Amino acid sequence: MWRSVRQEPDADGVSGAVAEDGAAGRSKGSRVLLTVGVAVTVTLAAAGFALGRNVSASRAQTHPGSAWLTTTADGSVNLVDGVSGGSAAKVPVPNASGHSMDVTQNGDLVFVRDTVTGAITVIDTSQLVATVQVPHSKDTTVLAGGGVAYLVDAIAGTVQKVDPATLAPVGAQVHLPGALGTPIVDHNGVLWAPVTAQGSVIAVTGDTQAAPIAVDPNGSDMVMALAGGTPTVVDRTAGTLTAITGGVAGQVIKLPGAANSGTGLQVASVDSNQPLPLVESGPTAQLVLVNLASGIPTSIGIPAGYTADDLRPPLQAGQRTYIPDFTRGSVLVYDGTTNRFGTPVPVLAHGGSFQSEIVDGIVYFNDPSSGTAVSVSTDGAVHTITKNGSTIPTAGPSTTQANPNPSPTQPPTTHPSSQNHDTSAPPVTETSTANEPSAPPTTKPVVPTSPIGPPSNSVPIPASSSSSKPSPTPTPTPTSSASLTKQPPPPPSTSKSSTPAPPPSTTSSSTPAPVAPQAPQAVTVTPNSANNGSVTVKWKSPGNASNIASYKVTVNNNAGVQSTVKGDPLALTVSKLTCGPSYSFTVTSVGPTGLTKSAGAVSSRACFSPGSPTSLNVTTPSGSANSLAVKWSKPTNPGIGTLTYSVTLTGPSAPTAARSVTGTSTTFTSLVPGRSYTVSVQAVTNGGKSTAVKGTAVAGGGTGLTVNLNAVKGYYAWAKSKGIISCTYPQCPTWIQRTPSTYDDTSAHGSWVTTATINERLTGYCYNGSGYSAEDDSKTVHSSIWIYVNAGGHFGYASSLWFGDNASTHSLPACPGSPPVG
């Protein structure tokens, strides 16, 4: 059996996938690089599901976690096993020799996109052959999930649902209002597309697009990610993360130091119950883990020396986060169990781009320009893969016509701008945090026995143990795979020291020159859960801490305020911070002689989004037919700083923009009587927006009315004798009118929308007191009052006489204007 990424996490909490199109020659700032590289391979694998196929006896059997990897030289894709490191089959892609390619896996379907020609090829996984090949614009990518596949042109803003087996169009093409950011497809087969010009997200199901969801300002650089099944929007212009819940923009989390970061903010499109990982490049290069449940982002400093590297979107497998580093041709590994970065996984012998993806919790890093790749299995073992499977002859794929409207537009290029930190922060109070657990040590790596292939190809990532001291780093053994040890080696020096080394001593009693201490490891900064304007800074001691006397913590954009920590716990609480700016924290090792070594700066905000409002109540004001009154209570966790509320109304004739409210109530007017409205309220501070609370109500309230035709029952006998009607009372209906101003028996009872029978219960909302004058059987009682009613979902007017109350308004308010009927 062969499987792609599952929809749900497995026993190790692993799911989701990410990939990066790192074709040589593309710049990091390219918009299409993100859209194509991440959206194509990443999103599809992330929303994939387990599959099975019948493999003939002549075909090699593979195992869960197998993946399809590309090789540029011969234009092929290899089916490889990430555990054994073996290759089961090689499938040539027609006309792709020498071309870079993207692979998309979704269920038992595999799509290969030629990035040079734009052609998309379907791989038949039951026969291991290339079948259909469809020419397309180079701007067209494939997205899939929930068994549904789409062709997306992000530049033209078009979406076309296709048959996953043939790529034939299914339904009409969807034209969205402008170019797109990075879209995703969820487990239900719904495509979520961020529209850059509008700052909105539009859900596409098949060939139907939903109403735009306003998320960010117009022109925002938006990237979609799927986190725990929830579509989220990362605005790289504003530096925010917004969750889409219930078809509306929900909780908004302000990311630390991420405003105007452009492609310097790399987003993982994984689907996991773990915190969503992002990577920020620039002055404070860091890994950010966003806990969507609590709304708290934790910042983790990238190891010193790697901060200026070309870092790409992270991948997440269980407790480990993998960050591709194109500058060095390797992968940084952060272990959430030990809270440390391990030794980078080498992929290339030198700097360069490579492809990344996750299948069933196995992480793959593929070098398309060579015949090798690297995988990390769920037990943390690193494997070298040789893409040398037996060549499967192509079936001669059929070729269909190209997209009739390919977009010739070249992708725009975005450039990250510098960080913009607020320096107007108040003084800082710092206190050492007591009773923090000591750094979890690691144990000596144990080479697991691989279920397939020689075990000598695998070395595990060390797991944490209960030992109170870290074990020494084992002596490396020559092997074809890399061992992930406790901390990364320092990067090679690129320049000579400006200070010449002192001459060698000529006496045997000379004192050796003092040695600078090693930099602290794994610096993390997390806003405290009390949301009170304080953060906790934590770090790990380096491998050799013998010459460290103390650690100095500096708040860089708060007048350089510093604090010193000696010994355990290696943590510090920094308080009295404001909710607005993003602060930068640096931890420095201080040696006995005063020599120092600093870790890279880590940025964080001092607060996060507030709690949700409580006790929401939506009612109709007394005497109003077209208004709704909304009231709520303050959140139990309001955070710090100014608290306001964003109130959104959806329904007929509702205002399109959210309303900002400083109090705890507001009223919406000029609504349509009898129509249902949904109210959404979010608490807002400088830390972000809360998850919305919602309420639903009908404008005008509504009064139950029972049709009672006693006042006019004599009419039916008269009308039947005249041939106007053919029914006999009480089986005769009455007619709900489109307008209250006419009622003509000789012309089909005026203009009516529906009928109601005697004793049927309707809902009345308001009245019109100047309509057609109806009369009762005696022809002496008249009424020009017409009640605006809902009769089985149809809205229209009924005379007050028909409810047996003669000329009564039934205590309803007067109708505002002319409510819609039908």
Image (cartoon, grey):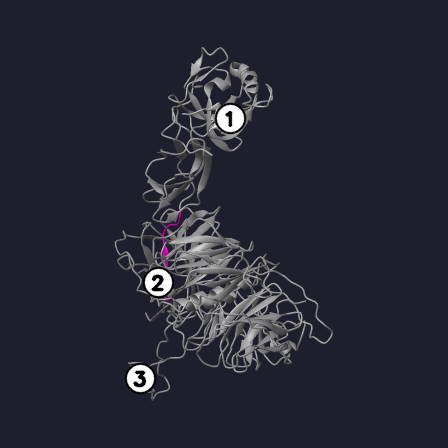
Q: Which quadrant holds residue 770?
A: top left
Amino acid type at circle 1 is Trp
Which label sits on residue 261?
2
Task: Judge depth for marks 1 and 2 and give the one in front.
Answer: 1
Q: Residue at x 46, y 21 (%)?
A: 799
- Specify the amino acid type for callout 3: Pro
Please name whichever residue, 508 or 567, is drawn nearer the observer in this view of the structure.
567
Marks 1/3 in contact by CB < 8 Å: the verdict is no
447 inside magenta stretch: no
Q: Which residue is mark 3?
A: 502
Numbered label attached to residue 735: 1
Quarter of the figure that contains the N terminus: bottom right
Give the mark nearest the N terminus, 1 or 3: 3
Q: Is residue 559 left or right of residue 414?
A: left
In the picture, residue 238 is in which quadrant?
bottom left
The residue nearer to you, when weighing 583 against 594, is 583
Region in magenta = 600-609
Q: Position of residue 217 (x, y in %)?
A: 34, 53
In which image quadrant can residue 627 be found?
top left
